Image (tube, rainbow, N blue to C red):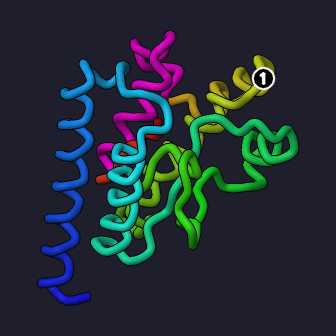
Amino acid sequence: MSTKEKILAAKHLGLAEATQAAIAAANGGWHAIKEADEGFNNATVAIVTSMVGLYGTPVVGKFNYYDNEVRKDIVEGKKSPFFAVPERVCTACADYILPAPTAETQADFDKLAGLIRYWNASSEAKDALLNGELAWYAKREKNSGYILNEIQERISALDGKLLIWK
């Protein structure tokens, strides 16, 4: 991908985020945006397509996995919580988008995956995770009730974007 194409993708990303902020402001805040707001959801799709233009093959994921088999496989580490951007981006297909992992960022991706497994785990599985791969998190002072903040901070640190759908 050329530098010019990356600059254009970055510009489109900024415009999509600005569009979302403008729609939120015009409606009285982020929580006041009406459900199924086409303009807002189109801006979210533009964020996804801009990230594809910027990073080539980013990955997406969800915070909550409702299919019990998928959730079980993710919690047990048999399946990654990250997946390829769908060919057709639709409303609520993902909750966040990240540049693909690299050798430099793989450790941070692994920590994020562990946090998402923890978020989706049963109480027993959470204890096992905190005593194992998430021991680093168990030692943190802010681990009580702030798991979503930690997940969001990790997404941001990896140059990812939260995908807000209405």
Q: Is residue 76 above or below residue 119?
A: below
Picture coordinates of residue 75 (x, y %)? 74, 40
Answer yes or no: is residue 25 visible: yes
Q: Which residues are magenta?
A: 137-158
Magenta stretch encompasses residue 100: no
Name the residue at 26% across, 30% down: 24
Quadrant occupied by the N terminus: bottom left
Q: Is residue 6 left or right of residue 66?
A: left
Q: Is residue 2 above or below residue 131?
A: below
Picture coordinates of residue 32 (x, y %)? 35, 20
Name the residue at 45% across, 17% down: 146
Name the residue at 24% across, 18% down: 28
- SS assignment for the magenta stretch, majority: helix
Q: Is residue 132 left or right of residue 165?
A: right
Q: Quadrant of residue 142?
A: top left
Q: Residues within 10 Å of mark 1 (few under 14, many from 20)?
A: few
Residue tagged 1: 122
Picture coordinates of residue 38 (x, y %)? 41, 46
Magenta stretch encompasses residue 142: yes
Camera-side residue: 158 or 35? 35
Q: Quadrant of residue 121?
A: top right
Q: Secondary structure at mark 1?
A: loop
For the view shown, which residue lies furthest in the right direction? 69
Camera-side residue: 11 or 113? 11
Q: Quadrant of residue 153?
A: top left
Answer yes or no: is residue 155 visible: no
Identify the amino acid type marked 1.
Ser
Q: Is residue 46 above or below residue 155?
A: below
Picture coordinates of residue 43 (x, y %)? 33, 52
Q: Is residue 52 left or right of residue 147?
A: left
Name the residue at 33% across, 65% down: 51
